[in-house]
Amino acid sequence: MSLTRIDGRLWNENRPITIIPSFQSSAEGSVLIETGNTKVICSASIEDRVPSFLTGLGTGWVTAEYDMLPRATNTRSSRDRNSGQINGRAQEIQRLIGRSLRAVT
């Protein structure tokens, strides 16, 4: 028996993935990843500074910022930067991304 999804894929078939490198011309590194209706933009920036606890140690630091566009879901959500306070979910996602990147650098 063959179960197919609404879009014609088999039950065990992944959505096609498109990866567009250098998506943002002003970022040191960027990529747009698309799978179905989901689009993710990743950007990398380089700054010549580190947190104060690393000053003078000759080391670098990797951090992450996460945000979801206001109409990324069915109901509009306010942008955290407008309220000046980041919501708990977004903060945990930022921490997870930052820790994951630091673990492999």
Image (cartoon, rainbow, N blue to C red):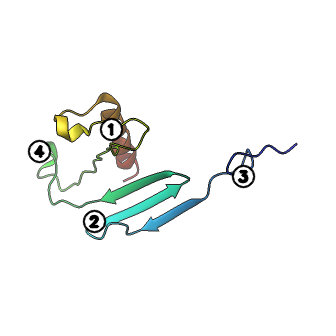
- Please tell me whether mark 4 sits on a helix, a strand or a loop: helix
Residue linked to disc 3: 8
| Disc with the residue nearer the chain's start (1 vs 2) | 2
Question: Which amino acid is tagged 4?
Answer: Ser
Q: Residue at x 36, y 38 (%)?
A: 93
Q: What percent of the width, then of the height, locates residue 86?
A: 24, 34
Q: Quadrant of residue 47?
A: bottom left
* Spatial CA span between label 1 and label 3: 37 Å
Report the mark closest to the observer, 1 or 3: 3
Report the mark closest to the observer, 2 or 4: 2
Q: Quadrant of residue 53?
A: top left
Question: Which amino acid is tagged 1?
Answer: Arg
Q: Please name whichever residue, 81 or 21, is drawn nearer the observer in this view of the structure.
A: 81
| Disc with the residue nearer the chain's start (2 vs 3) | 3
Whether residues under marks 2 and 3 lie with C-beta atoms below 8 angstroms apart, the answer is no
Question: Which amino acid is tagged 2?
Answer: Ala
Residue linked to disc 1: 95
In the figure, 7 relative to 23: above or below? above
Residue linked to disc 4: 52
* Spatial CA span between label 1 and label 2: 21 Å
- Please tell me whether mark 2 sits on a helix, a strand or a loop: loop
